[in-house]
Image: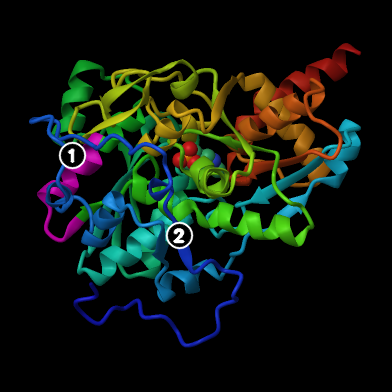
Amino acid sequence: MANKPAPTDALDYAIPSTVPTHWYNLTADFPEPVAPHLNPETREPLKPEELYPLFSKALVEQEFSTERWIEIPQAVREVYANWRPSPLFRARRLERRLGTKAKIYYKYEGVSPAGSHKPNSAIAQAYFNAIEGTTKLTTETGAGQWGASLAMACAMFGLECEVFQVRSSYDSKPYRRMQMEAYGGTCHSSPTDITEAGRKIREEDPDTTGSLGMAISEAVEVAVHSENTHYSLGSVLNHVMLHQTVIGLEAIEQLKKAGEEQADVVFGCAGGGSNLAGLAFPFIGENLREGKTTRIVACEPSACPSMTEGEFRYDFGDVAGLTPLLKMYTLGHEFVPPSIHAGGLRFHGMSPMVSHAKHLGLLDSIAVGEHETFAAGLEFARAEGIIPAPESTHAVAGALNYVKSGQAKDGEVIVIGLSGNGVLDLPAYEKELELERQEKLDQ
Ligand SMILES: *Cc1c(COP(=O)(O)O)cnc(C)c1O
């Protein structure tokens, strides 16, 4: 596969053995196969070659792979080792605060340099592109975490990075743009006037707040029309789910070390599905192969409840209908979600693998309201010190609800996927903080 000496060969130093050596592919263990992606024109199952204009060959191979274990290249493990294994903490102060006898753990991905789980895939994608001769990656970003993560990964592997950021987030979250630029990336407010897709959308609706679907259309268009340029997606696709499984693989080992036989219930937030899949798929694999009984709960925003209220059918990943058709839970590719603070959860669809797992009853989903999520985020911060990312507060709210409503049994092991920290997204908490200020005044 490596057809030229890479700028990416691993340095010669020992990587801790606790950094996973393989990614786990749930496709190998699904009781029924996942529906194939379809060519949008012919509606025939997509062939790997059809994705080559967009993605590196190695990533396309992973997209279609049914192998259970896929080796993590040494150069990728080496970067992972800068923050992996990420910590699994026991939330003792939160437990005390809640007065519960359940054991609450959280797997914390906010320790990565970008502050979330996203580099787990960004690093892998930049690496596989770099060794195949790609010189530039384009992508879209909602809240900006993916753009920042990819810009970082591109910087590490010597690639250019061009990011289309959803307009509402571009305007409300200047720090993410600065973070991308700090890593040497270029960031546009999408829809732009530099792509045909963007120009068309702006003609029809000049005041649009933008959406992930629109930004995807733009990034894909640029990748398809430029030399040595590939497109990169931060969630949804099978190869992204694959890369994220380091989260759950580590968590399983860490729980064992903590003396736990299994996790009883796992809460993760779900936008496109990648952090949830990363944490949950290794547990689901053990459920399927070893008869374990870990329950998975996907927590979605009630403003964009793809799995909880969407339909399971083929749909496009973008507004312009350029992407392959994906079998997934969807609110419809023309759905423009309200501009909520958890921008990373503003996607109309859901990863086909996560959707398939839900369809087969291997995971549940719930929708949580915005006030409830930020209240939970503050409660978590005051107990554990970490201010969760707006997206992660959905998982926290799901778990807190579970405990407070008396569903958690004594001794039960609860795992929260804390996908990132909220330090760069503090304005998202402002409405909730203002509510608290008012309450103090009213007392
Ligand atoms: C992007 C993001 C999400 C949502 O994306 P998924 O693919 O559903 O994981 C969740 N949490 C954080 C911190 C994010 O940055």
Q: Which residue is mark 1?
A: 194
What's the mark number on residue 23? 2
Q: What colouring method underlies this structural image?
A: rainbow
- Tell me the crowding category of disc 1: few under 14, some 14 to 19, or many 20 or more residues within 10 angstroms, Cα based: few
Residue at (46, 43) in percent of width and height: 274
Residue in front for this viewpoint, 130 or 367? 367
Quadrant containing the N terminus is bottom left
Residue 394 in picture, x, y percent from top left: 62, 30
Comparing 73 with 412, the one in front is 412
Left or right placement of residue 148 versus residue 442 in this view: left
Q: Amino acid at mark 2?
A: Trp
Magenta residues (range): 217-229
Instruction: Tell me if residue 108 can be seen.
Output: yes
Total labels: the figure holds 2
Residue 266 is covered by the magenta coloring: no
The disc, 1 or 2, on the residue closer to the chain's N-terminal end is: 2
